[in-house]
Amino acid sequence: MATAAGSAVRFKSNYAVSRKIEPFYKGGRVQVSRDGKFMFCPCGTKLNVIDVETGALLHSLEQDDQEDITSFVLSPDDEILVTGSRALLLKQWNWRENKCVRTWKSVHIAPVAAMVFDSTSTLLATGGCDSTIKIWDMIKQYCTHNLKGSSGVVHLVEFHPDISRLQLFSSSMDYKIRIWDLNSSKCVAVLDGHFSAVTSLAFTADGNTFISSGRDKICMVWNLKTRESKRTVPIYESVEAAILLPEQGDFSRLGVKKQGLHFLTAGSKGVLKIWEVATAACVYTQPVPFEPVESEEEASEHSLTHCMLVPERNEIVTVSVEHNIVLYDAQTLQLRKQLVGYNDEVLDVKFLGPGDSHIVVATNSPQLKVFELSTSHCQILYGHSETILALDVFRKGLMFVSCAKDKSIRVWRMNKDGRVVCVAQGLGHAHGVGAVSCSRLKESFIVTSSQDCTIKVWNIPESLTSKAKTALISSPETLHAQVTERGHDKDINSVAVSPNDKLIATGSQDRLAKLWSCSDCSLLGVFTGHKRGIWCVQFSPVDQILATSSADGTLKLWGLQDFSCLKTFEGHDASVLKIIFVSRGTQLLSGGSDGLLKLWTIKTNECVKTLDGHEDKIWGLHSNKQDDMVVTASSDSSITLWKDVTEIEQEEAQAKREEQIMKEQELSNLLHEKRYLKALGLAISLDRPHTVLMVVKAILKESDGRKRLEENIARLRKDQKEAVLTFLVTWNTNSRNCHEAQAVIETLLKHEAPDNLLQYSGIKSAVESLLPYTERHFQRLSRLLQASMFIDFMWQNMKLSDVSHQEDVIL
């Protein structure tokens, strides 16, 4: 098999993780550093620091107590980061070096719900679930105020921007806004106007006016001089954040035509809106890619939970309930970047783009996610109404197909600028569409299979493949199935199209794989042999072979001529969910429900490598066009990119071999030149006990060997002596080498003080190993000495008797 690939094929031996796209945000408040370069996202027990430009995870600040982080805050000067956990502890971090600088008790009797620094970064206010507010002096490190009087959880605390006023604003579960005078530690005003939780406060530049937003669908404008409400602005949705637009900026493209206060709101409908305070009118509504909805129940999946202005980047950052973090241009609200904090269960993944620059991901949701690998920017594609189950990409990498539980398929195209649009959709299956495969030679047809046990072939009209006409498409075309065939008695899990577009293979829960003619869906043959349901089918790119993987833990190769089983690969201990051919059809990669990835060589039936990169089922597995990268997707919410490191490892091994040969030659030269000290050092660095022994033997062969051995051993470094001690334990087990071992031991005992020897690593185990063998050698030498003395005695006696006999003869 695989002769067509030729002798030039290089077998792969290993893959290494080059990158992981993992959950980095699971809800809560997000903060961006003042310089706009770093983003801080809570994720359970960790606080992740993200590079905003690349989307890469720089490091994670993790609680020692393994308790979830309930709140955190970064100081305005970007220097101090404080986290609070359920363990009722506050931690101060040097976040750039990932070090916890200080830990202290929060003094709250319940977790801290909110934190804020003042504008000078010296005072920290913490609002607790115990209805109290504590204020901490971060320089002198003590609690300065304990403010009581709130009702329920204090979920919002904010210092007045003018620190000379020494005022703190707070809100709790009674929906009132309290103003605290820090000079007297008393509540000096209670602002009553909201009928639901107050979510944010925004102060004007002069500090005399502020805006409060609430989940009661209103924003209120307050006069701080009179401490009364100036205006109530109805927003018609639960508001999670309100931001005052800077007066000096140009916001004319957002409907700001007049001077005066304008503010931006983010809330339950998932749309950013600009409001004019003077008229209480909405002057701009952001256009969104999804269908705008009226009721909040329908909008819940798009609703925004947080919003902030980042002046340094001139961007507005929003956080959605789906954990998507979006960066918009502050002047135009044009989307600049989108990061996905949490992917849920990942069901499929494919490389996308002409140079495999993107990946398209199907998660446990109706939206597709297209990641640009270089920047982590994510496009979210709306269209399906239920969970997307599978994907496939056409050969050129610009068009791809998705299928979903909503019984539909959709065809998508990536434009030159990297934007992806839906160009066609098809309906026809009676149940969810679980598998899809594209034609291989041209973008001419799609094959789908469903839980309704049927397979359908959908032709793609030329208007979709023509670049000139594609640009004119305003709404998706409708596709119609050309052929429908009932294929199996149970769910069809996988479908594949042959490299020449003439054959279709299907794999089903009924334990059968079937081969069909592409033109009319006529059945050509059945592959029987698996003991449980088949999860995946794949055609070989070079031979007339079909590969199948099953819940019985095996992979099988089948001949397309006689439908016989050619090979069976056993090694997985769980269901094999995905397989692909690599190395021009000479090797297989398989992914199992135990999270393991296995590399197989077809010729030898051997599992070359097992890669452990996931903690749960591997649902997605795809190789790029260059065949040097693989992407896997799993139920553990992570996507892993693997790089083929076979050549790198071979080059490293070759370099090591060459270095070894050079060192061995150098060692030989040193021995020849009788430069024993260097020879010993080199042999120890090579970690070769036998070579070190040869050097010791060479030294002892010299006329003054003992003396020279002592000199050389004494001049070794401590770590080298420790290595020699380890080696001589092994030498001492063999009677042939025990003399050299004992000579080195004698030298060490002579020249090293007992206290120094006790400092050697592994000295205890070395002595324990040396004692029994040394006693055995001593006993053997004692017996040998006794025997030699007996022989000497016999020899002396024989000589005497022999002499007297000769004398008698002479006489």
Image (spheres, rainbow, N blue to C red):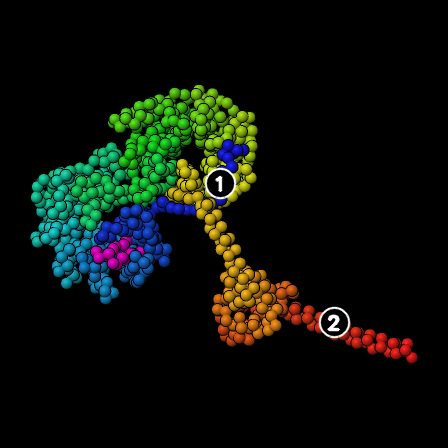
| Residue bearing the label numbered 2 | 787
**Callouts 1 and 2 close, C-beta under 8 Å:** no
Relative image position of residue 590 (x, y in whole percent): 47, 39
- Is residue 78 within the magenta segment? yes
Q: Is residue 795 visible?
A: yes
| Quarter containing the C terminus | bottom right
Residue shown at the point (20%, 54%) measured from the top left = 157
| Quarter containing the N terminus | top right
Horizontal relation, residue 402 to residue 700: left or right: left
Q: Is residue 153 visible?
A: no
Task: Name the residue nearer the viewer: 418 or 85.
Answer: 418
Residue shown at the point (12%, 40%) measured from the top left = 252
The segment highlighted magenta reads 71-87
Residue shown at the point (48%, 69%) measured from the top left = 717
The numbered dot on residue 534 is none
> Which marked residue is nearer to the observer: mark 1 or mark 2?
1
Relative image position of residue 78 (x, y in whole percent): 24, 56
Label 1: element kind: loop
| Residue bearing the label numbered 1 | 10
Q: How many marks?
A: 2
How packed is label 2: few (under 14 Cα within 10 Å), some, or many (20 or more)? few
Q: Amino acid at mark 1?
A: Arg
